[in-house]
Image: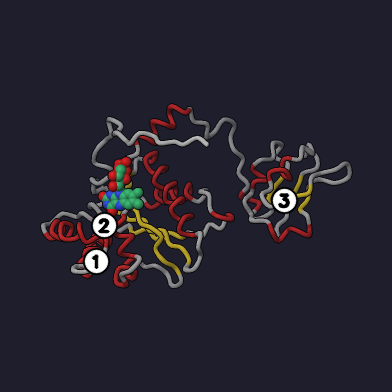
Amino acid sequence: MTSILVDQDLCTRCGICSSVCVMGVIDPADENTLPKVNKANEGMCIGCGHCEACCPSQALIFNDRPDEKQRLPAGAGTIAPEEMGFYLKKRRSVRRYTKDPVPKEKILEVLDIARYAASAGNGQPMEWVVIHDPNKVRKVAGLTIEWMKTLRNTDHPMNGYIPLLIGAWEAGSDVICRGAPHLLVATIPDGNPMAQTDAIIAMTHFDIAAPSFGVGTCWAGFVAMAASQYRPLQEALGIPAGRKCAYAMMFGYPQHKIFGIPRRKPLKVTWA
Ligand SMILES: Cc1cc2nc3c(=O)[nH]c(=O)nc-3n(C[C@H](O)[C@H](O)[C@H](O)COP(=O)(O)O)c2cc1C
């Protein structure tokens, strides 16, 4: 059961922990007591850690793996709007990679950032499969082409592209995984209606964080489509029983640098 530890010397009784609690589980301090989890509602806590993160005096520790409490260094994570704009507008889908492998430690650092993405009810349902071996990524691309071949002469919406993609693959061009050395696959439990959205958000965090590590990414839509249907590919991806592929992303070190920002459709906003 959830509990919080409050240091009585540090607690200023400001009430913020109680006010930010998403489920209203924390009773604020009064003249006699420190903030405390309300016994009647404690089962409602979703473990988001807001109470701890928002405590200005560092008095409160969320008592789940308390050793993992991390203090935010003063000023850390503050990015000027212009820098943020350049950083995000500079993100591009990378389809040309060097042959250099991204070390597993670096991949874990990027994934560690993705752990902090929003998820419905703080459910954090994602688990990751990282295909690190470039030969296995190529095998995944080949199986995706095999899946495409099963769609010939059907009314699948992909059908317009399929002959082109198969033709390019057979001519030696990896139009599926783009010769990327690595492939990231987000897996989610079967039967969780929010998990697909959670996985896309977490993978978007990976996508956004990766360039700051010098790593380029590209969403692997064809692989993801094939993985939702094609058993041989599901097996090759090593998706555990009871889980399914939510999406896939290729990544590696980009061959090319970015020198400009491409055009996009004008904003369409309705104020109401
Ligand atoms: C859901 C999704 C699936 C995608 N699938 C592929 C893909 O299979 N192959 C590919 O080369 N690019 C894929 N892309 C990349 C898009 O083509 C790309 O985001 C778009 O052209 C805009 O370019 P940018 O990402 O460089 O801004 C995908 C993007 C998204 C968001």
Name the mark on residue 134.
2
> What secondary structure is found at the residue carrying circle 1?
loop
Name the one closer to the observer, 124 or 56: 124
Q: Which mark is in front, 1 or 2?
A: 1
- Residue at label 3? 24
Say few, some or many: other residues with alpha carbon within 10 Å of mark 2 (under 14 / 14 to 19 / 20 or more).
Answer: some
Discs 3, 1 touching: Cβ within 8 Å: no
Give above or below for 207 relative to 138.
Answer: above
**Residue furthest to the right:** 32
Name the one closer to the observer, 170 or 164: 164
Name the mark on residue 189.
none
Question: Nearer the N terminus, badge 2 or badge 3?
Answer: 3
Badge 2 amino acid:
Pro
Asked if residue 16 can be seen in this view, the reply is: yes
The quadrant where residue 260 appears: top left
State left or right for residue 87 relative to residue 60: left
Say few, some or many: other residues with alpha carbon within 10 Å of mark 3 (under 14 / 14 to 19 / 20 or more).
Answer: some
- Residue at label 1? 155
Q: Which mark is in front, 2 or 3?
A: 3
Badge 1 amino acid:
Asp
State left or right for residue 3 relative to residue 49: right
> What secondary structure is found at the residue carrying circle 2?
helix
Badge 3 amino acid:
Gly
Distance in Å between CA atoms under marks 1 and 2 = 33 Å
Residue 210: horizontal and vertical position, in percent? Answer: 38, 44
Distance in Å between CA atoms under marks 2 and 3 = 49 Å
The residue at the point 69 percent across, 36 percent down is 56
Question: Nearer the N terminus, badge 3 or badge 1?
Answer: 3
Residue 173: horizontal and vertical position, in percent? Answer: 15, 54
Discs 2, 3 touching: Cβ within 8 Å: no
The residue at the point 23 percent across, 49 percent down is 99
